Structures are given as structure tokens and as C-alpha cells.
Amino acid sequence: MFDIHELRLRKEISHWNEQIRQTGIHVSKIHILPPHIANQIAAGEVVERPASIVKELLENSIDAGAERIRVELEDGGKHLIRVTDDGAGLEKEDIDLAVERHATSKIKDEADLAVICTMGFRGEALSSIGAVSRLSITSRPSDNIEGWRVRVDFGRDKKTMAAGCPSGTTVEVEDLFLEIPARRRFLKRRQTELGHISQIVRTLSVGFPKILFELLSDGKETFRSRPGCEGPQRLWPLIGDQLVPQMLPVEGKSREILVSGYVTPPEEARASSKSFYFFLNQRPINSRLLWKALNQAYRGFMMKNSYPMGALFLEVQPDQVDVNVHPAKQEVRFHDSDAIYRIVYHSVQRALEGIKVGAAPFGKTGARSEEAGLSIDQQELDIPPDAFQVSEEFPAYGEFPSSGQDQKTALIPGPDTPVSPDQEHHIHKSDGAHLWRDFRILGQLAKSYILAEGPDGLVLVDQHAAHEAIIFKRLNQQIARTDALDAQPLVFPEVLERNQEDIAKLPEICPILNRLGITIEPFGHSQVAVRSVPDFVASCPKTSEVVSELIDRILSFPEQDVKGLVHDLLASMACHSAIKANHHLELQEMNALLRELLSEKVTHCPHGRPVSQVLGFSEIERRFGRKR
């Protein structure tokens, strides 16, 4: 249905078109738009939602040298946005021009575009905001006795008057998009809009750590920064206090580029890239070039589709970067992109090198065998004294890939699999279950792979991938049967740090988490409490991180691919719950794992990796120069 404004406008257009048609007068098709309509069109690029307005006003306050900035909202900014600062303030002549389009104090001529040092520079924000709201600006320089106020209603009825006020500037934006119903309908719920605004305030507080930022929503304080924070503590508004002690420092310097910041170690990786930030000369930016450098530096340290948390701060000479690329000023263009890429890549890689040296994938580095040219450490094999005894405990279910063929070949037939005469001597029946008598465990390699001898050769089982595949299959079966996983209440709830944007989306993601046996609820302004999880997640050493990763995956997944999302979430839960690589297993544990593997007939983990490989006897004999 159309609202009353749209209906009235359509009637007027129809009336005038009919009048023109009857008179037969030719009217030019091209004409100059009225200023207030032109300003509304321009506002479409600058003002997308309340958060866009807050961003522009905060940048003006920062450019004015403010040391304290207060943001007050009503109804998520749809009814009122008030930004108050203690900056330099505006004279009467300046405040009168402030709401005019392309009026700015930050650019005077073309040469200034090449060396932009301020957050704002186009002179479009205030005029665009005034075109879609009721805008008032009240300001007084500290050395003036009185201040001035300018007011404009949806691009019309501009009024300037004297006003008593403290030094600094207060900008009020009321009834956003009230006269543009089509735009207003696109605004989200109060909590969602508040989440976007909170994210912008928190991000700028990290970029400008000496400024006190305050955010109030409907009279309640939701965020207050901590001016003067240094080192990794500077990042707490974006990553929370819990991760701060684990951050790795990043430092790099070239002739004209300085890089600093902090990144999380690989084991703290997240499933979403939303928790990493780039700042250029204190301005938050988005850059594919910087993301590429960061991802390449982490390559080999993290699994695919995992991302670090943290922030990198770049300082570059203003004439070496173009910030006039995107209407929202979030994207930039570097004059020497190769130099930027190299310094970011090498700086992050150096920060990770300490981890690589201090924690080898399989523990100790073995002694070098001169004859074989191989790295050998007998202690890392962990072969028990009875490892070479024949095991009689394995049910004959499952498949292992054969070394002699591309396709998978069943070495151990299931109950319905025909048994050839050649296989009969390997199998006998006991209580209705097939057993493979010649399967025997040899030991564990590098605390990550189970070694076993089979009829076709040496079988290597990836203990993590195998256990992950088993858990994933069983989770899928339970979801298929009951449409949900069983939940186990936690005696002491786990509390997670989340940003306001994520908390605002809890009503949307909770039904999905409930299917996974996870119950969460808001807990304060920037935290959520985890009340229950599945029993196998409760036994994980890092339950809170498992739940946090699941939330990330839900928020970053395409909405239309529900089946893919469930697969991804179950795979993540299985991965966290499975036996890890570099973990010692006793013989009984290896027996149990292989028994389950054969019973479940799994051959690949949910991420596509094979759970086992076979080194055939023919290949072994070829390598040793023997003929069978």
C-alpha cells in the first residue's frame, strides 16, 4: 500500500501531465532539480541509516579537536541523534554556512585534495543530513560570550539565531526520513540500528584512544571508552578484555610507511572476518590489498575460512594515499600498493614466527639419520609393548582406500557385503559380527596418526579427521531423527564478549542455536550468557570459544543456504570435540577409535580430508628395491 504522501504526489503529477497534454505546449524533458530534491539524492550516498549520520558527526567532532564526545539516541537514532563535543566551536558566519552543500573548512583549493589530513573534507554531510531530517546545530567557540544556532527542516526553512550554550558544538538530528517513507521503511529495529552505531563508536574509540567517547540509548549508557589506553589494551572495545593478554604485537617500518598493531595467535582464529580492523592515519578503512597481505601472512598457520582478530594501524604520508575514492570514505587507494603489501605481510609474519619456532606441529624435533636421510624420534612413535599382538576386537564395518586403485575398496566387508573365497581366511563370525583377524595396530606416529598393518599394506589413520568424521555423522543422524541436539544446562554460565550489532541479532540466530542444543541470552550491554550446550561441547576445554565461533558462522553465512549452514555448524562442533593432532593415545584408545571408524563407514571428514591412507606392499617393496 502507498502512504498518503506518495498518493498525493502521484495525483499532482498526473494532474499536471494532463494539463500539459491538453495545452499542447512542448516542455523540455531535461531540467534542473530543485535544491531540496538534489540534496535528498545526494543524501542517498552519505546517509544510509542512523549509523551513517553518527559516523559523519563524530568525524566532524574529531576534526574540531574534541577531547570528549557524547552520543545520545532515541529509538535507535530514528527519532533523535544528538552528538555533543567540546571542540573548537563555530563562529556565526561559519554556522550559517555549515548546512549549505559543499561548504567546508577543510579544503580550500585543488592542491588540498592531494594531502587530506582530516576525517571529513567533502562538505556534503550536514547538508545531506538536513535534507532528510530536522537538523539543528548549536555552537560556541570558547572565547565567545554567546553562541549561535542554525536549524533546517528537510532542506527548507533555514533559520539562524543567537543561543546560550556551553563551548563546543551540539548537533541534533530528529525524525530521520520522516518525509521519505520509502527510505524509512528500510530502517531496522531499534536494537539493530543501535548495534550499528555502537560498532562505529567503538571503532573510532580505538582509532582515537585519547578521546573520551560516550554512547547513551534512551537515557541509558551503553558504552564509555577508556582514554589513554596503550598497547593491546587499546583494542578492548573491539575484541573484549579476555583476549587482550594473548595479542601478538606487530611492528614494521619503511622509509615512508609505519605499521603497528596486534593480532591473535592462530589458535584464537574466528570463523568471521568481522573482528579484524585496519586503520590508516587513524581512519578506519576497508582494503582488499591489506586483507590479502594479512591472509597470506597467516597462510599455513590457520585452517581455511578462519580469520584472526585484532587491528593494524598504518601511518602513511597523506600524499601517498587517495581517500577520495568511496562516498563513505572507507576505501582508499595507495600510490605504492606493492610497498604497502610487503610491509604488512612481513610485519605480521614476523609476529607469527615466534609461534612457528616455539611450537613445532609434532612436538620435539627428531635426530637426523644420516643413512636414511629421515627425521626419526623413537619417543614420538609411542609404540606400546603389546602393539604387535593380533587384535580380535574389530567389527568388520567400513572402508579404507586401497593403495592399488583410485576408488575406495572395501577391505572389511559389512554384514550385507558378499565375502569372496579369497577373503574368508581373514574373517570369522562371532555373535553375528564380522571380525578382521589380521588387522593389528603398530603404534602412533607423531602423536597424530595411528599406524596399523592390514592385508594390503600399511594403513595410516589421521586420528583427528577420523574422530571428527565419526562425530559429524552421528550429529547429522541425531538432527535427522529429532531435528535438534540434546542440551545440557551449565552449572555456571559462560559469558562471551560480543558487540552490540551481534547482540541485536540474537532473536534471529537463537532458533538455529537452539537446534544445536545451545541456549544464549543477552547479559549486559556487550556480553551474552551461554546457559546450555550439548554434552560433548560441555566437555571441550574451550566451550566459550566453540559457541563464539558458531555465532560468527551463523552471522556470516548466506541466509538462503540453510542446509549449508547446518552442515557448517555441525562440522565446526565436530572439529572442536574431536581428538586433536599432537595428542598421545593409549593402545586401548586407538582400538576404540578404529572400532568406531569401521562401524560408522566414514572415509572423509566433513571438510573433505580423507581419514586414512594405505601404503601398499607393492609400493613399499618398490621403494626398497624388492620384487614380490
Image: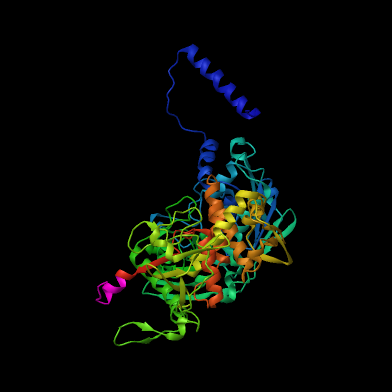
Toward the viewer: 47 or 509? 509
Residue at left offset 49%, top offset 76%: 582
| Residue 573: image location, x then y, percent | 58, 61
Toward the viewer: 481 or 230? 481
Residue at left offset 36%, top offset 83%: 375
Q: Is residue 549 magenta?
A: no
Side of 395 relative to 287 (left or right): right
Toward the viewer: 621 or 543? 621
Side of 108 relative to 565 (left or right): left
Q: Is residue 346 above or below residue 59?
A: below
| Residue 239: image location, x then y, percent | 59, 67
Quadrant where the N terminus is found in the figure: top right
Q: Is residue 465 above or below residue 372?
A: above
Quadrant where the C terminus is found in the figure: bottom left
Total numbered circles = 0
| Residue 74: image location, x then y, percent | 71, 50
Q: Is residue 624 magenta?
A: yes
Residue at left offset 73%, top offset 53%: 218
Toward the viewer: 131 or 107? 131
| Residue 130: image location, x then y, percent | 59, 44
Q: Quadrant of residue 377?
A: bottom left
Q: Does any portion of residue 137 appear in the rendered image?
A: no
Q: Does any portion of residue 250 appear in the rendered image?
A: yes
Side of 484 relative to 575 (left or right): right
Q: Which residues are magenta?
A: 619-628
- The colouring scheme, among rainbow, by chain, secondary structure or one colour, is rainbow
